[in-house]
Amino acid sequence: MARKGNREPGRKRGRKRESQFMDAAIDGYIRDLALHRWRDFEDLSEGHGDPERALQEAGVFVEAGPYRPLWQEAWRKHVWPGQQPRPMHLFGCMEAAVREALLAEKVQRAERGDDTIEDTPGYKEFVARALNQLLEEASGELENFD
């Protein structure tokens, strides 16, 4: 039985797997960023004793550089103090804001010709940390087979 075309076996599946990995990695990165923002909010809230002020300060995004307005707008839309009632738990609102801002930043980076999100130090660090954790867990499972 002859194969259709000159395609290598598994080639299409390889691209699909790569795409699935990248989608999962970006979703994980979004969750990680949201968790960091949540921890910042908790620290600020504890320090000020005022959760609303802490939400405002957590939404400054100085580290976002030229993409800061995107992040601040998403934060205002999903998290900003006084946005009541919140449609979900506050962390879910933060995660929605991070997702919207990061995806908008990806588009704007492409338009400007800047490095992709996947080429930023923060993303690379996240992927390396996640892979190291995965490998450590896998090595522990392998040791249990002995």
Image (spheres, helix red, strand yellow):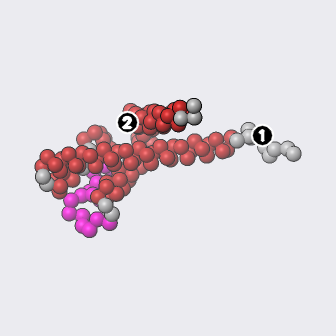
**Which residue is pictured at 81% across the width and 44% down the height?**
3
* Disc 1 target residue: 6
Q: Residue lying at the far right in this picture: please name it.
A: 1
In this rendering, which labeled residue sits more in front, label 2 or label 1?
Answer: 2
**Which residue is pictured at 33% across the width and 48% down the height?**
34
Residue 78 visible within the image: no
State which quarter of the image contains the C terminus: top right
Marks 2 and 1 close (CB-CB < 8 Å): no
Residue 97, position as x, y percentages in the image: 33, 54
Circle 1 crowding by C-alpha within 10 Å: few under 14, some 14–19, many from 20: few
- Quarter of the rendering containing residue 17: top right
Foreground: 144 or 2?
144
- Quarter of the rendering containing residue 106: top left
State which quarter of the image contains the N terminus: top right
In the figure, 142 relative to 40: above or below? above
Residue 9 visible within the image: yes
Foreground: 141 or 129?
141
**Which residue is pictured at 21% across the width and 53% down the height?**
55
Which stretch appears magenta?
A: 69-87
* Disc 2 target residue: 122
